[in-house]
Image (spheres, rainbow, N blue to C red):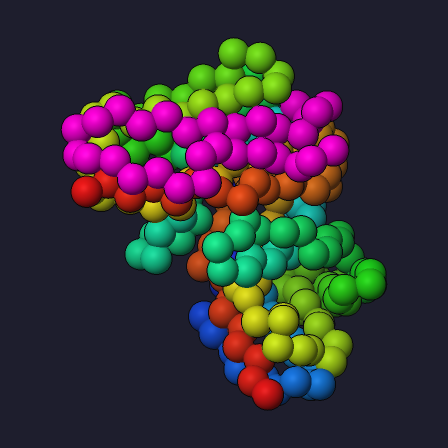
Amino acid sequence: LAKTTQPISMDSYEGQEVNITCSHNNIATNDYITWYQQFPSQGPRFIIQGYKTKVTNEVASLFIPADRKSSTLSLPRVSLSDTAVYYCLVANNNAGNMLTFGGGTRLMVKP
Amino acid sequence: DAGVIQSPRHEVTEMGQEVTLRCKPISGHDYLFWYRQTMMRGLELLIYFNNNVPIDDSGMPEDRFSAKMPNASFSNLKIQPSEPRDSAVYFCASRTTGWGSEAFFGQGTRLTVV
């Protein structure tokens, strides 16, 4: 079971790009990387996932280096509404592994 | 689809009482998960089901906790008897089979045991 390590908290300002890096040194060949976002009083919500290189969607980009031992979630031009907790998960076909959450990164976006 | 539906949204009960939390997963999803979230312990996976069968309940804290999934459209989590330390937000999530399938979470049930 690959453990993830990410910063406990980050601060940013509106309009800035935010990069949150997650370490997963023990990632296995069949594992993929998933990020979730959680607002206060809500359940986590899927943001993005990938296996290697770069993935981009309408919300974020995910950068994964060749060794896959880390990944970086990039949020372009954040707004106050991006203030949330961001979780990095490493998972494989086993459903239980997929949804084992760590502590997450609490992002605070300031005006 | 209305998403994962949990009820009630809030529950306040007295210590010693039985509490039942309910979840309706998204239709067609064959995995269902129960989580508990507190400030101290974060998001903890309690139990998950595949095709209505419990697969891993190692996260269930004590025998006071039990969960069932009698059919594909319903699951419940019971705490009997409840204790103040059970106060938390309980989330239910569902997903389909398949590599990389996304999990969808309900809005959660905020349980307060006094």
Q: How many marks?
A: 0
The percent coordinates of residue A104 (x first, y second) are 50, 61
Check the image and report above or below for A52 versus B5: below
The residue nearer to you, when weighing A93 against A80, is A80
What is the magenta range? B1-30
Instruction: Name the side, left or right, on which A104 lies relative to A75.
Output: left
Q: Is residue B6 magenta?
A: yes
The percent coordinates of residue A47 (x first, y second) are 69, 56
Q: Residue at x 51, y 17 (%)?
A: B69
The residue nearer to you, when weighing B35 against B106, is B106
Residue A27 in view: no
Instruction: Name the side, left or right, on which A58 lies relative to B54.
Output: right
Check the image and report above or below for B33 versus B87: above
Q: Is residue B39 magenta?
A: no
The percent coordinates of residue B102 (x first, y second) are 70, 42
Check the image and report above or below for B77 versus A44: above
Instruction: Name the side, left or right, on which A1 lies relative to B31.
Output: left
Q: Residue at x 52, y 34 (%)?
A: B6
Q: Residue at x 53, y 77 (%)?
A: A108
Residue A13 in view: yes
- Residue B32, by quadrant, is top right
**Can you say which quadrant of the picture contains the C terminus of chain A?**
bottom right
The percent coordinates of residue B85 (x first, y second) are 22, 43
